[in-house]
């Protein structure tokens, strides 16, 4: 007997707080998406990088965005949210986000840090504009990661919402 999934609302919250000389700084921010019907949340051990930070090398593919829903893959048009957290207490994480033009954007996440994406589009920018000008936003096609100095554990969660027909 199959189970019918009832779509639910998703909220991501971020709170930052700092007090200096008895003055409080910070805020609470919420990001909400209605009628989400799919989530993928996992804790994964990622390999130690072998590339010295170059695009090629040993990276663990965490998730791919395509036109179909399959193991480790979600439908690009339905993507709403992605978060990755470096669960290691000592080593940093090198995060790579790959777009549909094979461009790669890298982020270094210190121990305990997290990174969030709220849209399926990105636009890599270099110091000098290419002859044809800066590119339009490209679709995110994949997320991969490697531990800097050691294999490490990461947690990721990705949320999807059906496309309105």
Image (cartoon, rainbow, N blue to C red):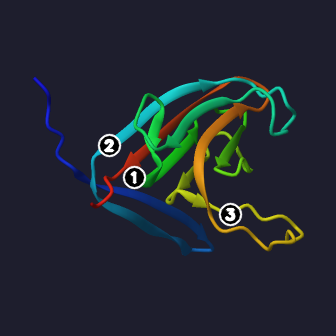
Q: Which residue is mark 1?
A: 78
Residue 122 place in picture, x, y as percent: 63, 60
31 left or right of 9? right
* Labels 3 & 2 near each other (Cβ < 8 A): no
Q: Which label is found at residue 145?
A: none
Disc 1 element: helix
In this view, the residue in front, 37 or 114, is: 37
**Residue drawn at point x = 54 percent, y = 53 percent:** 116
Residue drawn at (60%, 42%), measured in percent from left and top? 142
State the quadrant of the C terminus.
Answer: bottom left
Q: Secondary structure at mark 3?
A: loop
Residue lying farthest bottom? 23
Q: Position of residue 101 (x, y in %)?
A: 70, 52
Quickly name the residue at label 3.
123
Measure how far apart labels 1 and 2 are at the Cα level. Answer: 9 Å
Ranked by sequence position, the earlier of labels 3 and 2 is 2
For the question of whether residue 87 can be seen, the reply is: no
Label 1 close to label 3 by CB (< 8 Å): no
Q: Residue furthest left?
A: 1
Residue 136: % across, % down = 66, 68
Q: CA distance from mark 3 to mark 2?
A: 26 Å
Disc 1 to disc 2: CB gap under 8 Å = yes
Q: Which residue, given by chain and number where applicable, does mark 2 sit on?
A: 38
1 or 2: mark nearer the eye: 1
Q: Mark 1 or mark 3: which comes first in sequence?
A: 1
Q: Is residue 147 left or right of residue 82?
A: right
Where is residue 30? Give x, y as percent: 40, 65
Q: Is residue 59 above or below residue 28?
A: above
């Amino acid at each position: 007997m199959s189970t019918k999934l009832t779509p639910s609302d998703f909220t991501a919250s971020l709170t930052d707080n700092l007090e200096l000389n008895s003055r409080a700084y910070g805020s609470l921010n919420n990001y909400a998406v209605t009628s989400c019907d799919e989530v993928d949340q996992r804790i994964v051990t990622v390999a130690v990088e072998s590339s010295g930070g170059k695009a090629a090398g040993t990276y663990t593919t965490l998730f791919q965005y395509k036109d179909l829903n399959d193991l480790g893959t979600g439908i690009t048009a339905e993507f709403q949210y992605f978060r990755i957290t470096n669960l290691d207490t000592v080593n940093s994480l090198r995060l790579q986000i790959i777009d549909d033009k094979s461009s790669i954007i890298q982020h270094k996440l210190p121990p305990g840090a997290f990174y969030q994406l709220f849209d399926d589009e990105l636009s890599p920018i270099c110091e000098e504009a290419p002859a044809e000008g800066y590119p339009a936003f490209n679709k995110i096609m994949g997320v991969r990661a490697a531990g800097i100095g050691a294999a490490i554990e990461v947690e990721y969660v990705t949320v999807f919402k059906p496309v309105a027909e």
